[in-house]
Image: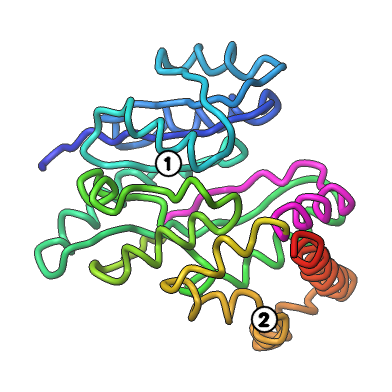
Amino acid sequence: MNNPLVSVVVPTKNSESTIGACLKSIKNQSYKNIEIVVVDNNSTDDTKKISLKYTKLVFNKEPERSAQRNFGVEKAKGDCLLFIDSDMELSSHVVENCVSKLKTENLKQKIGGIIIPEESFGKGFWANCKALERSFYIGIDWIEAARFFSKKIFVELKGFDEKLISGEDWDLNQRIRIKYKISRIDSFIKHDEGDLSLLKLLRKKMYYGTQIRNYSSKKENSKDFNSQSSIIRRYKLFFSNSKKLFSNPIIGVGMLFMKTMEFGAIGIGYLLKK
């Protein structure tokens, strides 16, 4: 596997504001043996039209992201898979670094997945708060999840659990980790938060809360879920670097408030479903 084809699978839904930058970042990778597979979910905007400027492999699949991703793999021809969302952009060496990592470390221990760290950007106060929050997660193995996989191993593990609406990335990561090594690279994915609205964010978290039981009830997820669902564990992480947390006190306090509200919204969603 000297120069493997890498299939980058991108699920979309009404993503016209971000999909162009996302796909352009894939086209601009230093590693060139790439195919782009876009799997849309009945967009009513120009998402598909924009996507077709970058790839002919544009499909439609519903109902949710896990099903879209698995469908994309069915259409993919690559030996390796990279999954990113339509509001993400790859720094220029991400795919090259992932392929290199796979080649070098596979000689020692079979790699099942590779984590690519994320950093957020966007407009406005809440986007700045989210960027600060995400900066604390780099290197935290109970938060980060792999995005780059050998297709053979992905298929062996039967891909994403389509019953999961939230936590599907963590779930796959934890299933792979039972048998294979999870590695990481240093190149970043940039996550475009846009003009982030706290109200929309909390609505999304409440929706995820209605679905979280499907994730938390799986045996292989129970250990990490205890950390992921603990606001105390999250606060300990933030306060472990109080200098960074309060380098801008207003953003720091805003981030803590936002994260507390997110946990509350998830909890409400969980209780409503229960």
Depth check, mark 1 against mark 2: the one in front is 2
Q: Quadrant of residue 247?
A: bottom right
Tell me the SS state at disc 2.
loop
From which residue to which does the magenta span run? Answer: 187-209
Residue at 50% x, 65% y is 144
Q: Quadrant of residue 273?
A: bottom right
In this view, the residue in front, 268 or 108, is: 268
Q: Which residue is mark 1?
A: 92
| Residue 49 rendering spot, x and y as whole percentages | 59, 11
Residue at 86% x, 49% y is 124
Earlier-in-chain disc, 1 versus 2? 1
In this view, the residue in front, 72 or 270, is: 270
CA neighbours of label 2 inside 10 A, class few (<14), some (14 to 19), many (20+)? few
Q: Quadrant of residue 95?
A: top left
Q: Total label count?
A: 2
For residue 75, the mark is none
Q: Which quadrant of the rendered structure holds the N terminus?
A: top left
CA neighbours of label 1 inside 10 A, class few (<14), some (14 to 19), many (20+)? some
**Kind of residue sitting beneath label 2:** Ser
**Kind of residue sitting beneath label 1:** Ser
Q: Is residue 19 above or below residue 212?
A: above
| Residue 37 rendering spot, x and y as whole percentages | 41, 26
* Label pair 1/2, CB-CB below 8 angstroms: no
| Residue 213 rendering spot, x and y as whole percentages | 62, 64
Residue at 57% x, 41% y is 88
| Residue 168 rendering spot, x and y as whole percentages | 51, 54
Q: Which quadrant of the rendered structure holds the C terminus?
A: bottom right
Residue 256 falls left or right of residue 18: right
Q: Which residue is mark 2?
A: 230
Residue 133 falls left or right of residue 188: right
